[in-house]
Amino acid sequence: MGEMSGHHKKDVGAVLQKNGVSFRVWAPFANAVAVSGSFNDWQQQSMESEGDGYWATFVAGAQAGQEYRYAITNGDQHLFKNDPRALQVTTSAGNSVVVDKHFDWTDQDFKPVEPERQVVYEMHVGTFYRPDPSTIGTFEDITTKLDYLHKLGVTTIELMPISTMTPQREWWGYTPMYIYTVESQYGGRYKFHEFVNAAHERGISVILDVVYNHLGPADIDIWQFDGWSQDGKGGIYFYNDWRSKTPWGDTRPDYGRPEVRDYILDNVRMWMYDCHVDGLRVDSTIFIRNANGYNDAPDTDLADGWHLLQQVNEVAHKLNPATFTVGEDVGANHYITKPAGEGGAGFSAQWGVGFPHALREALQASDPAQINLAGVLGELNLTYNGDAMQRIVFVDSHDSAANGSARFNEAIAPGKADGQFARQQSLLAATLLLTAPGIPMLLQGQEFMMSGNFNDWEGLEWQNAEDFKGIVSAYRDLIALRRNLHGTSAGLGGRSFNLLHVNENDKVIAYHRWQNGGSKDDVVVVVNFGSHAFTNYSIGFPLSGTWRVRFCSSDKKYSPDFAGIHVPDVHVQSGNGTFVLPPSTALVLSQGA
């Protein structure tokens, strides 16, 4: 892929060879560079300048597992730095480690589920599952829950970032210090490979969050890496002018430098090629394409950042045409998911950040007069470039459930996040999520009424999965419909949406979803946001005949304190159907045995 920058360097970093290790590092302003490690008793072996800013040497007899650093001289500065391309560090403050990249993969036959059938589960390794509350979660721990996720119906795990972070025990992951490493407290690279392999064995794909909008806090080793900088800024890896400033520090990478672009694009290659991940979610793309994170502000746009996003997608799709890339942009900008050939960034999909807010506005009010249907209707109708599958929709994400806010059930019922109102409204939200146009995503623990907010120190309450097993089974039933596992709801994976009915007075909506149309394909969803029970509610249906109730959110099997009003099948003649509609209930109906 050297055509990208014209001088793409191969084998940068420490590369294990047959009888030693080759080292290559970019340090264009250094007067001299040496490598020092446990293989030479921390003596300094000089590296040769390759004339293009890179320095290289070969250390005979060096082996995997040995530690090293680079000794860099710039004038009277003597720097002792970790490798920016280290595949492992002992700790965030420790040394780089030579890694043997070999792993016995057994996932040759794995194929990800197509986007139309995907159900994504956002997961944070440190808090998802901790058998021992005094430690943080590891890849081995979360691997033990893959069967649970498979049974739930999840097709895709989206992992929050796993690269080495700051020294403390808890972190979200969005302050990467070494983007090529895997956090050792999670179990490191080998255990990550085992986790991905185990997910693939169960038919589950893995998308990884990556952070290229800023790097670490300012005390990272690549800061002023070879001793050069301007105006006290970050040196060769960073912008050294107004473009350096981000909300997370003065650490925006210089996307205009070919070597920095290669640093990022080779990172994409590593995650996909070496680690077998099936896609990437690129964090805060709006701060890569605009210095201030503004959507429509040409004066502060970063053309090099936009070009980098296009290259990230080009590289990813070249390595794996089925790869799934997600831009977290918040600008609701159609160009994020337009193909590069049409001037777009080329992402497969982007986060639909308006969806959770619209659901909260509609579902937190117990007084029907305060229920805002307009926001929900707007979100159900929203697509990017006319394609529903270019949008990831969610009730909660790590962002919407934190940053001064709380999880959906906590936000609508503070202090009573697992009470009857919260459970009933959560299933309304889940029905909207899993029947809406778009690719649905759950936040870990959402399916068993995890309360409070998302944070990086509190493990999930797995007892909830038992205490609220009815709610978990409701999610399982909805996911099965979304994925058409029973062959009666193909339309939920379609791209088509039509609003059939809006009753602003009683707060009832109904919509039609289809792929090709007809029996076992057409799906009608009815949502009663209000508190009225109806014995004879009428709406227009797309087809005559018998419509079977595939899901009723207020069924007692999901919670013994639910209304449990039986809703018989609906017999539609000349386009109109009349049916029982319980209060605060969502129904999913389709035709066919």
Image (cartoon, rainbow, N blue to C red):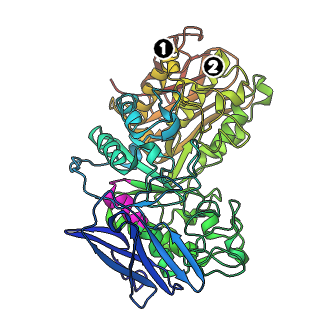
- Position of 556 relative to 304 (above/below): above
SS label for mark 2: loop
- Position of 557 relative to 69 (above/below): above
- Report whether 224 appears left or right of 19: right
Residue name at image x 27 percent, y 62 percent: 63
Q: Nearer the viewer, residue 194 or 277?
A: 194
Q: State the residue position of label 2.
A: 418
Magenta stretch, main secondary structure, is helix
Magenta region, residue range: 267-278
- Distance between mark 1 and mark 2 Cα atoms: 29 Å
Q: What amino acid does circle 1 point to?
A: Pro
**Residue 244, percent from left and from top:** 67, 72
Q: State the residue position of label 1.
A: 568
Q: What amino acid does circle 2 point to?
A: Asp
- Report whether 61 appears left or right of 312: left
Label 1 neighbour load within 10 Å: few <14, some 14-19, many 20+ = few
